[in-house]
Amino acid sequence: MPSILQISVASFYITIVYLIFKLFRGGMVAQTNAVQILDAVDPSKILTMIDTINMYSKLGQYEQEEKLYFLLIDIMRSPELFKEITLSSRKDEPEKTEHDKKND
């Protein structure tokens, strides 16, 4: 009987420690999901797309929402495309102006 009591006390303490670290981790790691957007030079186009997806959802225009959502997924999966849309974040790479882009 005493061994059953010790196991439940030990499991109680393990559960408490697990929950404390889970809460702590949730508070600290939750911000890593936004790093890609926060580190971008100009994420306004991506953020506008996200707002538009939310707007379509609230208006019940689910086909447009789905199209934009999958386009956003494709953009987020492609680092080159994401970099092109949000501009370069490299210090040694000069930013292209609209005039430079037209001449390319």
Image (cartoon, rainbow, N blue to C red):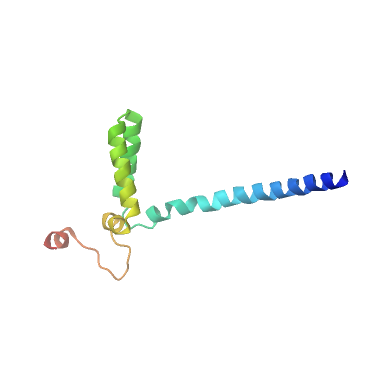
Left or right: residue 65 versus residue 28 is left
Left or right: residue 15 versus residue 97 is right
Measured as percent of width and height from the top left, residue 78 is found at: 32, 55
Q: Give the residue drawn at x 21%, y 63%.
A: 96
Which quadrant holds residue 67? top left
Which quadrant holds residue 97? bottom left
Number of numbered callouts drawn: 0
Most extreme residue toward the top, as rendered?
Answer: 60
Most extreme residue toward the bottom, as rendered?
Answer: 92
Measured as percent of width and height from the top left, residue 27 is found at: 55, 49
Is residue 78 placed above or below 53 in the rendered structure?
A: below
Measured as percent of width and height from the top left, residue 59 is found at: 32, 29
Is residue 29 placed above or below 4 in the rendered structure?
A: below
Most extreme residue toward the left, as rendered?
Answer: 103
Quadrant the C terminus occupies: bottom left
Q: Give the residue drawn at x 31%, y 49%.
A: 74
Asked whether 41 or 77 is in front, the reply is: 77
Measured as percent of width and height from the top left, residue 25 is found at: 58, 52
Which quadrant holds residue 88? bottom left
Asked whether 14 or 3 is in front, the reply is: 3
Q: Give the residue drawn at x 71%, y 50%.
A: 14
Quadrant the N terminus occupies: top right
